[in-house]
Image (cartoon, helix red, strand yellow):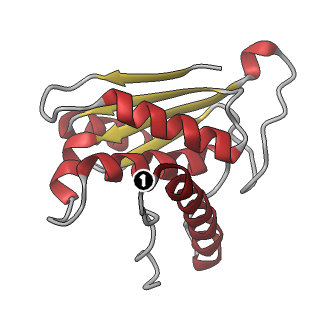
Amino acid sequence: MSLVIRNLQRVIPIRRAPLRSKIEIVRRILGVQKFDLGIICVDNKNIQHINRIYRGRNVPTDVLSFPFHEHLKAGEFPLPEFPDDYNLGDIFLGVEYIFHQCKEDEDYNDILTVTATHGLCHLLGFTHSTEAEWQQMFQKEKAVLDELGRRTGTRLQPLTRDLFGG
């Protein structure tokens, strides 16, 4: 189904074509290419606003995921009953925040791919509230990014690699 990438900010230039091609591969790796997915790129002001409303945290952040299927357990696939249920949800990328968090030796476009992959794992029920949940999510992200690397020649690390000191 469709992958929609919207850029609703003007602070940081976004190259949508490379992001689209990598996320299309990630969707195939995860087996969810038949599901609609929205990726919305926003600035610090807007991601902070969304973060405050939905998470009660009045700070900018890198990624917020809003699943269409809210009660999936980690790694479960949605089981759509109707054609309109072939939707994973939306991922908001705080591209300004991500840009400023990038280290000198990191490629911004690669970090966007990693962050969107992290958000996609959240849409599939993965979380990182506990160390056990983090370990499960980290392993999934690592497997997906390793396979993406095999297919595209990139070497990407999971976003949550340092969350619990691992």
Which amino acid type is marked by label 1?
A: Val
Label 1 SS: helix
Relative to 38, is 96 above or below? below
Residue 59 in sight in this render? no
Relative to 132, is 122 above or below? above
Q: Quadrant of residue 39?
A: top left
Residue 90 vs residue 130, the one in the foreground: 90
Q: Quadrant of residue 106?
A: bottom left
| x and y percentages locating residue 86 in the rendered image | 73, 23
What residue is shown at x 67% (from left), y 31% (from top)?
Answer: 33
Relative to 121, is 165 above or below? below
What residue is shown at x 34% (from left), y 51% (from top)?
Answer: 110
What residue is shown at x 39% (from left), y 36% (from top)?
Answer: 19
The residue where tag 1 is placed is 114
| x and y percentages locating residue 68 in the rendered image | 65, 31
In the image, 82: left or right of 23? right
In the image, 42: left or right of 79? left
What is the quadrant of the N terminus in the image?
Answer: top right
In the image, 15: left or right of 84? left
| x and y percentages locating residue 113 in the rendered image | 41, 47
